Image (spheres, rainbow, N blue to C red):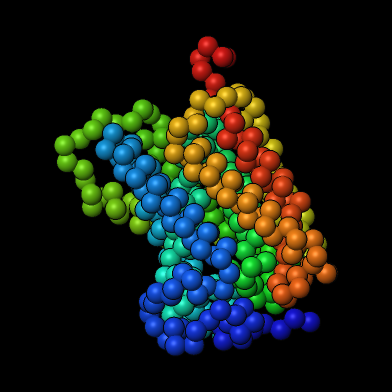
Amino acid sequence: MVEAKTFLELTYLLGGFTPENIQSWVFVKSPLALHHWTMNVVEILLLIGAGWGLRFSIGRFRSGETIYLGFWLASVIFMLAIEVPVYFPELLGGQSTSLYFIHNEFTVNFFFGRAPLYIMGLYPALMFTSFALVRHLGLVSARFPLVSLAIAVGLVHHIFYEIFDQFGPQYRWWIWNYANFGATLASVPLGSVLGFAFAGPVGLTLAVGWLWRRELAQAPAPKQSASPWLPFLGRAIFAGLATPILMILIIPGTWFAVMGVDMTLEREQWSSWLVLASAGLLTLWQVARKTQWGLAGIRLFPVQYLGLFLAVFVGLWAFAWTDYRQAVAGITASGAPIGSLSYVCLCGLLGALLLMRRPKSAEDN
């Protein structure tokens, strides 16, 4: 049986750590001294996405659509609310072995080496961009607008996130503390496949959508001479803080616990895949009904950035192919676990298909 590891034990297994760095609240490391060059690529890619999304959301805010900037800010608050407590379980009354994972050292790091800057960019880069793409495509049911919107954002985010999530462990971007998880998809725990990749963005969309429900239900409000910043920031902060609670409520394991049913590996597997398959069918049904083939949105931020994201990861996976193919029992020659390339290909195909769709116009119906 695999034993749970402490932070220091995991840093030893992960490699790439400088002991004096993890004594600092914040530190900067030379980008030339990272464990692997792919780490430079992903941090640049995700920070570009976060900054690009912020620019896009500010532009929409100035035109009267405040929900975009609210979502972007709420995603950052959600990141702080969910990630930071996970880094320090002992501060919440847990054991030092209760860690779920640790990140390797990237160029800029916070919280004593626990939180790389690129992870802070990951949430707005992918969650916000998934939200913007779903809004662009109009994947919303008239009968259940908020729920259908949240499910679509969760599914789109899952598609792109898993391309990243299945790659990272192979080049030691992070390491999982497997003893604290149950079932896995290759090297990735289903807790991440379902929780971080799907349930998190669903919860965030529900929270933001409820607080901005008037804006979702009607055309953008006219631009005002003075923006009510305090209530606006309050809503964004509240949405971000509420998201972890909604995320936990969405995960099947919560309901198994409420009903007093043991979460076996088999139950975790079928319940997780049932949730994802249902979300996939519902969202693809909306795609078929509300969109058609076309590249009319090729100049829009979400289409351009997610296209860039796919292109970069096609290159990364092509580079990783040799090590992946030569892995024995799921472990490369360097001792790192591999992800599921078949699932990545499925996600990549679905992602590419989404980017080649455009909303149906009134004349198309």
Q: Quadrant of residue 257?
A: bottom right
Residue visible at 75% across and 70% down? 332
Residue visible at 59% across and 31% down? 356
Q: Position of residue 67 (x, y in %)?
A: 37, 42
Work out which residue is located at the far left of the displayed protein and give it.
225
Residue 147 in view in this figure: no
Q: Quadrant of residue 238?
A: bottom left
Q: Is residue 293 left or right of residue 29?
A: right
Q: Is residue 159 left or right of residue 213?
A: right
Is residue 194 shown above or below 152? Answer: below
Is residue 287 shown above or below 55? Answer: above
Work out which residue is located at the far right of the displayed protein and give it.
329
Residue visible at 58% across and 69% down? 36
Work out which residue is located at the far top of the displayed protein and give it.
363
Camera-nearest residue between 146 and 66 = 66
Q: Is residue 220 left or right of residue 154?
A: left
Residue visible at 45% across and 50% down? 49
Is residue 178 shown above or below 146? Answer: below
Residue 227 in view in this figure: yes
Q: Position of residue 235 (x, y in %)?
A: 33, 51
